[in-house]
Image (tube, grey):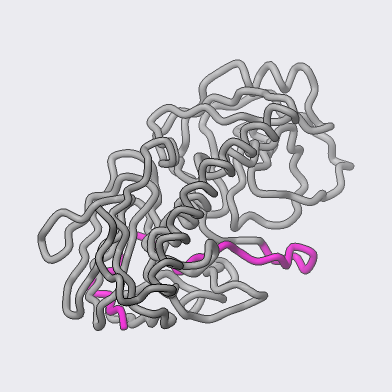
Amino acid sequence: MLEVLRPGLQTTVQDAGRRARALGVPGGGAADPLALRLANALVGNSPGAAALEVTLAGPTLRFGAGTLVALCGAPFTAALDGQPFPVGRTVAVEAGQTLALGGTARGARAVLALRGGLSGQEAFGSRGTDLRSGFGGHGGRALRAGDRLAWLPLPPATPPRAFLSPDLHTPTGPHVTLRVLATPEATPGLLDALTGQTFRVSGQADRMGVRLTEAVPAPHDPARVSLPNVPGAVQLPPDGRPILLLPDAGTHGGYPTPLVVAAADLPVLGQLRPGDRVSLREVTRAEAHAALRQQEHEVRQAETALAWWYAGQREAPHKSRPPR
């Protein structure tokens, strides 16, 4: 059992999200999906197992039983019973210990995975929390002090000594460049305006979307019909201030979407915080696919190596000491 002593700014249960967009339900899931996969791999979980997503200021948690945990994503400060707790490594936690997550100077979110994965309310095939609709996760809401969460059982394991390569960490601000693809709604003028300047993230930033402060000339078409949205779409509302959509965004909308963020950069998008500066760089479809293939290759290498470690323990449980 995991007891929440202090909830942090916004801590929710998230997993890999749901596939119910045809029903008008947002996909949801971790805003930094790479952090989720890597944290789960570090504790021997499946890639989409449910974990805690912490935002800007983390929670304080007391463990009622021993387990393995891993923190990935933005470089949050953290302490286990007052001792420094690393990001990107597997740590064995004993019953009664307290993990306090602080804040982060860069990025917005981190994922804390527990061996076995968190249990919780499942809706439309996912345990991810949809805050707007109030379902999934822990009562469909962010954690509160006094909440108690359980995790699913897995055999005990020795934590690997491995640590993640810095190359696998999701890039964070204060200045990031997002690769974008033009959609059929992109005109030469819009492309020049959107890719020719640096934007700043406004205070309107949550799991639905990130609004930028600088405006560009926005097309106005009262007859435009509502069209499907996807995470990463760059919407242009009438005031011309772009909105970059995140996992909890609605499945359709009436604003033009001249650009969409390349899939390889969606984790970076999920790490934007108010005040960050953002540049948009147009790439071709081939370049976007190549970037995603390279990213998948590197992440799967890490996942495979860690899966091999845990599989080896199942096959030879008497060999509890890691290789030197």
Residue 14 colored in magenta in the image: yes
Residue 172 percent location from the top left of the image: 41, 36
Point out residue 181 in the picture as x, y percentages from the top left corner.
71, 31
Q: Does 107 appear in magenta?
A: no
Indicate whether 116 appears above or below 91: below
266 up-or-down from 305: above or below: above
- Give the left or right position of residue 256, taking residue 69 as reference: right
Residue at 36 percent across and 37 percent down: it is 166
- Residue 283 lies in quadrant: top right
Give me the residue at 48% from left, 69% from top: 50
Determine the image quadrant of residue 235.
top right
Relative to 187, residue 202 above or below: below
Residues drawn in magenta: 1-26
Q: Quadrant of the N terminus?
A: bottom left
Using residue 41 as the reference point, say whether residue 322 is left or right of it. Answer: left
Give me the residue at 51% from left, 21% from top.
198
Using the image, determine if residue 100 lies above or below residue 102.
below
- Residue at 70% x, 65% y: name it: 19
Q: Position of residue 91 (x, y in %)?
A: 26, 62
Q: Residue furthest right?
A: 223
Tell me which corner region of the image, top left, top right, bottom left or bottom right, holds residue 20: bottom right
Between 92 and 79, the residue placed more toward the observer is: 92
How many dots with numbers? 0
The answer to whether 322 appears left or right of 168 in the picture is left
Q: Position of residue 197 (x, y in %)?
A: 56, 18
